Amino acid sequence: MTYFVEGIQGSGKSTLVKLLSEKWPDHKVLEEGDYSPVELAWCAYMGMEDYQAAIEKHPSLKPEIEAKTHFEDDHAVVCYTKIRTDDRGFYQALERYEIYNNRVSFERFKEIVLKRYGSWDGAPLITECALFQNIVEDMILFRDMPDEAIIDFYRDIKNAIGDKQIHIAYLKAEPDDIRRNLETARQTRVDDKGNEVWFSMLCDYFNNSPYAVRCSLKGEDGLVRHWIHRQDLELRICEELFPDRCTVLPSKSYGEKDIDKLFE
């Protein structure tokens, strides 16, 4: 069984992943930025010519690049955010090859996502925000797609998954908790001078998205409205498409009995 731990930012996914990994130590745990057979967040998806060019441009990082690269047919998946360097240009150069945030056409995006889900061998995993977060954010914020079109996309993902053994553990947050979690993250994710670096980057990402611009959303209030909408949509996908393969848990207030439901 593969467990997809899902929920909006700050809902407690990392904690649940840790608990599940303790119960299933034989399952491989995948976090954002790790190489995953189904998720490409924080990874560059590169054709071989572009991959070789990146190595030639950054020769001092060649061993690290090669160590963090996995090959899929005629593409290289480079987990570039796992490489440590002071060369900020390296990260900027590799970021261009991510598939999210409307960096590739929708047709190409769909082709890549469905091909990888279909090719996945179903090996048991415990993943954090691999099924929903980055795909849904891409389609809402940067492609400005309506809910029904996003649900149709997930019908295709469901078909690509087929009869592979999966279960979604969805951490549902109440609206007041969504705002409270965001405020907590703002206070804790700061640099050594107390600057809200994380929140500033998050706002730049959100405020400049086509969806936020069209809806005149920005800042904390805009993010909260967006996350409430996103959570409602993801829960609808769970209910309509994965009713027998999903357990909804109360964010940060679930107990041992709630976790045991995942293993029934």
Image: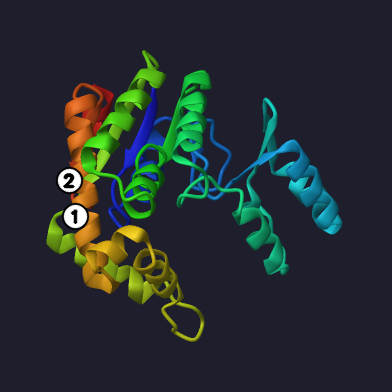
Q: Quadrant of residue 182?
A: bottom left
In the rendered structure, which amino acid carries the disc numbered 2?
A: Asp
Residue type at numbered disc 1? Ile
User: Are discs 2 and 1 less than 8 Å apart at CB?
Assistant: yes
The local crowd at label 1, few if under 14, some if 14 to 19, many if 20 or more residues have their Cα within 10 Å, is: some
Q: Residue at x 71, y 61 (%)?
A: 90
**Residue holding disc 2:** 232
Quarter occupied by the C terminus: top left
Name the image quarter holding the N terminus: top left
Using the numbered discs, state the Cα–Cα distance from disc 2 to disc 1 in whole angstroms.
6 Å
Res 255 seen here: no
In the figure, residue 190 lies in which quadrant? bottom left
Badge 1 marks a residue whose secondary structure is: helix
In the displayed structure, does residue 171 sit left or right of residue 51?
A: left
- Image coords of residue 51 (percent x, y): 75, 43
Number of numbered discs on residues: 2
* Residue that numbered label 1 is attached to: 228
Residue in the image at 69% along x and 44% along y? 68
> On screen, 253 above or below 258?
below
> On screen, 82 above or below 17?
below
Q: Residues within 10 Å of mark 2 (few under 14, many from 20)?
A: few
Where residue 127 appears, x then y in whole percent? 43, 38
The correct choice, above or below, for 156 with respect to 86 in the image is: above
Q: Where residue 200 appears, x then y in whole percent?
A: 41, 75
The answer, for residue 233, to whether it is visible in the render is yes
Q: Residue at x 13, y 63 (%)?
A: 176
Give the side of residue 94 with respect to residue 130, left or right.
Answer: right
Image quarter for residue 87? Answer: bottom right
